[in-house]
Image (cartoon, rainbow, N blue to C red):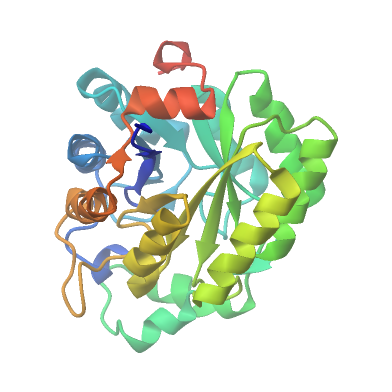
C-alpha cells in the first residue's frame, strides 16, 4: 500500500498587508506573534512565516531587534520551521528588508521574484476607520507604489543569505516570476529543490481564477520538473478555495492572517490557528496528512533548527 502523502502547511502569522484597525485579532506585539506562531504549529503548521511590527502602533518593521524579541520564544516552545520575510513591506528599501534574515540566519526566508505593482488601495472600500495615522495613507498611496525586486536585488539577497545555509520560499506573483526563478536556478545561484510559493489574488499579480492556478502549476512543472515543491496562497476570500485546489493537484498550502483576515463570509478569523485547523481538516478529508516540521525539513532539505542564529 502506498504511503499517505504529506502536505506542508505554512502559516503566515501577521504580515505587512493588513493594518491593526482591520482586525482586533491581528498579532502585533512580540508576545502575540510568538503565541500565535506556536498555536499555529500546534494546530498543524510545519512552517511559520514571520514579519515584525512596532508594538505601539502595529506598523510593519524590519528591525532585527524586534524579531529577536519573539524568535527565541518560538524556538524554545516549538520545533516549527521558522521562515523570516525578506519582503518586509513594499515601502521599504531592499537592504532594510534583508537584515533580519541576514543577521538571524533562519532555516527559510521568503524572497519575491520580481518587481510589481502592489495595490492595497481597494481595501479602503471596506475599511473606513483607522486607529493610527499611518494606516490610511499606507493603503491609499499604494496606487503609485512599485514593489521593487530587480534581478540585482534578488541576486544580492540570495548571495548574502546563501552562506548561512538559509533556503528560500520563492514567492511568485505571476508567470514571469517562475521564469526568473528558473534563471537563477540555471546559473546555480538557487539550488534545488525550490520551494515555490505561488501567490494569487493580489492586485498587480496573477488572479485567483482556477485557470490561473492551473497555468502556474503547468509552467512550474515544465520549468522545474521534479526539482521543486509547490505551494500556494490565496489572498482574502480566495485563501481556502485556492488551497483546496493545490491539495487536489498534489501541492501544499499557506494560510494565515497575513494573507486573509477571514474565516468565512463576514466572519473574522479569531486566530491563525483557526485557519490552520480549517486547512488541516481539508487535508485529511482528501486522505492526506499534514507534514510535521521535521518532515518538512526533509522534503525541503533544510539545515535544521540548531543552525539558526537566534
Quadrant (top left/top right/bottom left/bottom right) for the N terminus: top left
Between 251 and 3, which is closer to the camera in this rendering? 3
Between 33 and 11, which is closer to the camera in this rendering? 11
Q: In this view, does 277 lie above or below 245?
A: above
Q: Which residue is drawn at 62% across and 71% down?
A: 145
Quadrant (top left/top right/bottom left/bottom right) for the C terminus: top left
Q: Residue at x 54, y 23 (%)?
A: 301
Between 244 and 41, which is closer to the camera in this rendering? 244
Q: Where is residue 98 in the image (x, y as percent from the top left)?
A: 60, 38
Q: Which residue is drawn at 60% across and 58% down?
A: 217
How many numbered discs, if any? 0
Query: On the picture, is 167 further left or further right than 223?
Result: left
Q: Position of residue 261 (x, y in %)?
A: 27, 66
Which residue is the extreme one toward the front? 1
Query: On the picture, is 237 further left or further right than 16?
Result: left
Q: Where is residue 300 in the image (x, y as percent from the top left)?
A: 52, 29
Q: Residue at x 62, y 32 (%)?
A: 193
Taking the image as drawn, is residue 113 in sight?
no
Which residue is the extreme one toward the right? 187
Query: On the picture, is 139 further left or further right than 284?
Result: right
Query: On the picture, is 96 further left or further right than 158?
Result: left
Taking the image as drawn, is residue 58 in sight?
yes
Q: Where is residue 245 in the image (x, y as percent from the top left)?
A: 42, 63
Which residue is the extreme one toward the bottom? 125
Amino acid at each position: 500500500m502506498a504511503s499517505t502523502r504529506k502536505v506542508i502547511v505554512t502559516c503566515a502569522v501577521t504580515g505587512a498587508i493588513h493594518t491593526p484597525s482591520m482586525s482586533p485579532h491581528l498579532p502585533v506585539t512580540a508576545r502575540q506573534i510568538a503565541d500565535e506562531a506556536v498555536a499555529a504549529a500546534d494546530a498543524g503548521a510545519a512552517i511559520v512565516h514571520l514579519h515584525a511590527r512596532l508594538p505601539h502602533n502595529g506598523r510593519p518593521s524590519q528591525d532585527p531587534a524586534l524579531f529577536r524579541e519573539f524568535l527565541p520564544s518560538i524556538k524554545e516552545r516549538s520545533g516549527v520551521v521558522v521562515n523570516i520575510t525578506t519582503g518586509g513591506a513594499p515601502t521599504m528599501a531592499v537592504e532594510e528588508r534583508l537584515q533580519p534574515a541576514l543577521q538571524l540566519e533562519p532555516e527559510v526566508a521568503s524572497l519575491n521574484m520580481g518587481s510589481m505593482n502592489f495595490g492595497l488601495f481597494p481595501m479602503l472600500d471596506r475599511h473606513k476607520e483607522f486607529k493610527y495615522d499611518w494606516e490610511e495613507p499606507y493603503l491609499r498611496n499604494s496606487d503609485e507604489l512599485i514593489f521593487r525586486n530587480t534581478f540585482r536585488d534578488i541576486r544580492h539577497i540570495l548571495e548574502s543569505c546563501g552562506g548561512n545555509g538559509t533556503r528560500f520560499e520563492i514567492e511568485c506573483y505571476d508567470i514571469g516570476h517562475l521564469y526568473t526563478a528558473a534563471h537563477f536556478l540555471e546559473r546555480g545561484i538557487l539550488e534545488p529543490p525550490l520551494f515555490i510559493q505561488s501567490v494569487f489574488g493580489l492586485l498587480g499579480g496573477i488572479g485567483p481564477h482556477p485557470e490561473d492556478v492551473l497555468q502556474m502549476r503547468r509552467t512550474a512543472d515544465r520549468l522545474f520538473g521534479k526539482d521543486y515543491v509547490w505551494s500556494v496562497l490565496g489572498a482574502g476570500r480566495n485563501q481556502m478555495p485556492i488551497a483546496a485546489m493545490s491539495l487536489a493537484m498534489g501541492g501544499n498550502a499557506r494560510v494565515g492572517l497575513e494573507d486573509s483576515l477571514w474565516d468565512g463570509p463576514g466572519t473574522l478569523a479569531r486566530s491563525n490557528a483557526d485557519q490552520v485547523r480549517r486547512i488541516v481538516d481539508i487535508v485529511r478529508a482528501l486522505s492526506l496528512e499534514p507534514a510535521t516540521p521535521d518532515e518538512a525539513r526533509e522534503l525541503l532539505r533544510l539545515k535544521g533548527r540548531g543552525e539558526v542564529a537566534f
